Amino acid sequence: MRLLGRDLAMDLGAASTRIYVRRKGIVLDEPSVVMCDVRTGKIVRYGAEAVADSGGSTHWPVSGGLPADAELARRMVRHFLRKVHWHPYARPRLVMALPGDSTPIDREALQDIAYEADARTVRLVPHALAAALGAGLSLGDRTGHMVIDIGRDAARIAVLSGESVVATGSVPYGGQAVNRAIARFVEREHGLQLDDEAAETAKRHAHDGHVVVRARDPGTGRERELSLPVEHIFEATTQPVETIARAAMETVERCPAELAADLGERGAVLVGGGALLRGLGRRLRDALCMPVRRAERPLECVALGLGRCVDELGVIGRLRGGRT
């Protein structure tokens, strides 16, 4: 290890935090959650350990790629950084993603958390560009590309031209909203309750035919298996999908005509955990009248894109908004 520390990239997501080490790849992937003691309020667990333990109150301190609870987010970031880069003297250089709708105050808050967590320097890359790089899009020309990133708490749409973000849009309908829509449908139609894990299973495994999940009977408290037809899952998620499609169409309308024409040919790429909803690409393709595909590694696209900025130091200098 160099005395001054490693070069790292951190994708600070609402659902998960991923850390990429230069030339090694993603070495940490844990839920962005902390657990506090219900009596004292002190933090007792982070990440995967917090999810596995039911003995305290859980908090998700990140929303939309930004700290929602600055103190909890700072302590969580420091914990994760020390898991991959603990050294009594070395401090890492860090690359992070900055959401497209961020304000100067948001930018400063994100930087402050990183510095307080012992980062030596912090470089911020536009979130949409990081996602596009991680999805393997070629940004060397001036043609138009669209990235639809469906995170835990929001869906963000961006149209890119070259290495610049031309237009953005967002709606508060992310993967969690899709899960809640499935759970509400099951409760309304079957009188059973799905927890978030079961709804996530239904979302990811809705192949042709049926998907089997475990639901709880609120009257007896017992669990039972429920076979859900895939068409019912599609019906349950109509509202969030249509809302995301409208936001994407409105984003395209704000683009120059030549870029809109490019999108008609090149289409959009789906990234983020919400992209795992089966059939989402086809449904958005029908609504937008353009090709839509899911990235090969949708959950990891932002971390991989930030990692490219770490591996190829010249990349970050070309990206607009890349300097702190």
Image (cartoon, rainbow, N blue to C red):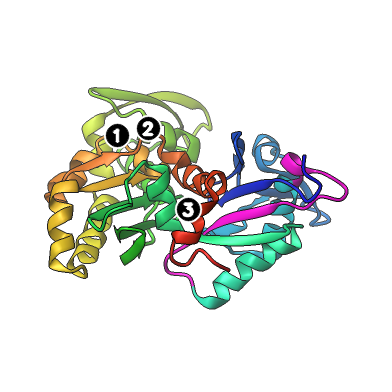
Q: Residue at x 61, y 41 (%)?
A: 22
Q: Secondary structure at mark 3?
A: helix
Q: Residue at x 69, y 41 (%)?
A: 50
Instruction: Tell me the residue that label 2 is attached to.
Output: 204
Instruction: Tell me the residue that label 3 is attached to.
Output: 315
Mark 2 burial class by Cα count in 10 Å: few <14, some 14-19, many 20+: some
Whole-percent x, y for residue 120 in the image: 73, 59
The circle drawn on residue 278 is: 1
Q: Is residue 70 above or below residue 285?
A: below
Distance, label 3 to label 2, CA atoms, is: 34 Å
Quadrant of the frame with the C terminus = bottom right
Highlighted magenta segment, given as a residue range? 82-102
Task: Tell me: 27 left or right of 264.
Answer: right
Q: Amino acid at mark 2?
A: Arg
Whole-percent x, y for residue 265 in the image: 13, 48
Q: Which residue is at the front of the view, 5 or 11?
A: 5
Q: Amino acid at mark 3?
A: Val
Task: Tell me: 152 left or right of 232.
Answer: right
Q: Check the image and name the residue furthest to the right.
A: 88
Q: Is residue 143 above or below residue 207?
A: below
Q: Secondary structure at mark 2?
A: helix
Task: Tell me: 119 left or right of 271.
Answer: right
The quadrant in which residue 202 appears is: top left
Q: Secondary structure at mark 1?
A: loop
Which of marks 1 and 3 precedes in the sequence?
Answer: 1
Mark 1 burial class by Cα count in 10 Å: few <14, some 14-19, many 20+: some
Q: Amino acid at mark 1?
A: Arg
Q: Which residue is at the front of the view, 30 or 238?
A: 30
Which-is-in-front pick, marks 3 and 2? 3
Mark 3 burial class by Cα count in 10 Å: few <14, some 14-19, many 20+: some
CB-based contact (under 8 Å), mark 1 and mark 2: yes
